[in-house]
């Protein structure tokens, strides 16, 4: 099955923020009805997956949030909090517009 978007969320923090972000993203996918899409007659899923270190800690914005990457675009986000999940799902996954305030520079 091909994913429309595949999100990897770092859970390598001392706090549980990465796990909380992943849970919030999954909840928003269901809430905004973007967990599964029917595009061109093919079912496409958006998947959130936890990951160990994504090796962008030194590039992350200062704060206590998590890092995550969205594929296939390869867009990186830093200092993501659970409250940001709605914006990422609606804007990035729903409208194909990265959330600039959270985006890490390449």
Image (cartoon, rainbow, N blue to C red):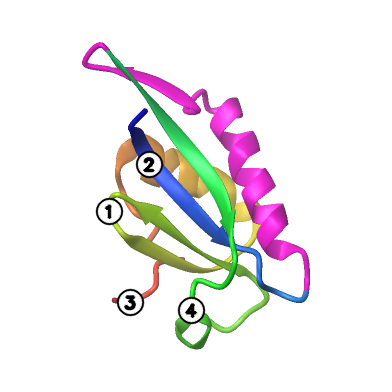
User: Which residue is situated farthest in the front direction here?
Assistant: 1
Distance between the alpha carbons at the discs numbered 1 and 2: 8 Å
- Taking the spot 48% from the left edge, 41% from the top edge, the residue there is 89
Q: Which residue is mark 2?
A: 5
Disc 3, SS:
loop
Q: Which residue is denoted by mark 1 in the rendering?
A: 73
* CB under 8 Å between discs 1 and 2: yes
Q: Is residue 76 magenta?
A: no
Q: Which mark is residue 105?
A: 3
- What percent of the width, then of the height, locates residue 63? 63, 79
Q: Nearer the viewer, mark 2 or mark 3?
A: 2
Indicate the quadrant where residue 66 lies: bottom right
- Asked if labels 4 and 1 touch by Cβ distance under 8 angstroms, the answer is no
Highlighted magenta segment, given as a residue range = 15-41
Count of numbered tags: 4
Provide the residue designation for mark 4: 55
Name of the residue lying farthest toward the bottom: 58
For this rendering, which residue is in front, 84 or 5?
5
Indicate the position of residue 14 as horizontal and vertical percent values: 76, 76
- Going from the N terminus, do you reach mark 2 or mark 3 first? 2
Instruction: Residue 52: tell me if it is visible.
Output: yes
Residue 24, above or below 58 = above
Given contact means CB atoms under 8 Å apart, are the residues at marks 4 and 3 in contact? no
SS for dot 1: loop
Q: Is residue 39 magenta?
A: yes
Labels 2, 4: front one:
4
Q: Earlier in the sequence, mark 1 or mark 2?
A: 2
**Badge 2 vs badge 3, beta-carbon distance below 8 Å:** no
């Amino acid at each position: 099955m091909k994913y429309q978007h595949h999100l990897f969320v770092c859970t390598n923090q001392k706090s549980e923020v990465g796990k909380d972000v992943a849970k919030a993203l999954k909840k928003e996918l269901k809430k905004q009805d973007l967990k599964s899409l029917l595009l061109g007659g093919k079912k496409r899923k958006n998947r959130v997956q936890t990951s160990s270190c994504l090796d962008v800690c030194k590039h992350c914005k200062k704060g206590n949030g998590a890092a995550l990457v969205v594929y296939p675009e390869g867009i990186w986000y830093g200092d993501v909090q659970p409250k940001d999940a709605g914006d990422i799902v609606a804007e990035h996954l729903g409208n194909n517009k990265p959330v600039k305030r959270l985006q890490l520079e390449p």
